[in-house]
Image (cartoon, grey):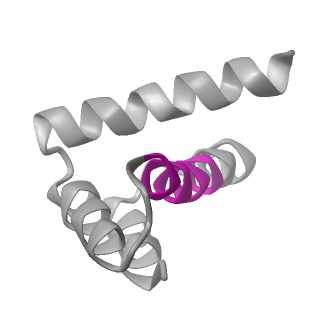
Amino acid sequence: MANKNLKKIVLQVVDNQLRENNPPITKITFERLQQSGYTTQQAKEKISAVLLEEMYDVLKTKQPYNEERYSNKLLKLK
């Protein structure tokens, strides 16, 4: 149950990033993944995985969010 709730929340964050175009790399990555053949849901889930990884790193290292690191991870998605 917790995993489903977490997935729902992280997907909502991705939706917010896409809607607000903040950071812009999220929308760029989303569109690139869709052009590569991923469905809307698949593209959002791939971005969500990167977002979750970034959130984990922030919590683990107690370092602030690093948009450049997040952007670099999104650029590597295939």
Tell which of 43 and 63 is nearer to you: 43
Number of marks drawn: 0
Tell me the residue at 30%/60% (across/down).
Answer: 30
2 left or right of 59 in image = right
| x and y percentages locating residue 16 in the rendered image | 28, 29
- The x and y percentages for residue 18 are 22, 42
* Residue at the image point whose x is 60% and y is 48% from the top: 58
In the rendered image of this protein, does residue 78 appear above or below residue 15?
Answer: below
- 38, above or below 7, in the image: below
**Quarter holding residue 31:** bottom left
Magenta span has 66?
A: no
Point out the image quarter for the N terminus. Answer: top right
Q: Nearer the viewer, residue 69 or 29?
A: 29
Q: Residue furthest right?
A: 1
Q: Nearer the viewer, residue 36 or 72?
A: 36
Percent position (x, y) of residue 37? 39, 74
Q: Which residue shows up at 61% across the image and 47% down it?
A: 52
Prevalent SS, magenta region: helix
**Relative vertical location of residue 32 with respect to residue 64 in this rendering, above or below:** below
Q: Which residues are magenta?
A: 41-54
What is the x, y in percent for residue 57?
65, 55
Q: Residue at x 47, y 56 (%)?
A: 47
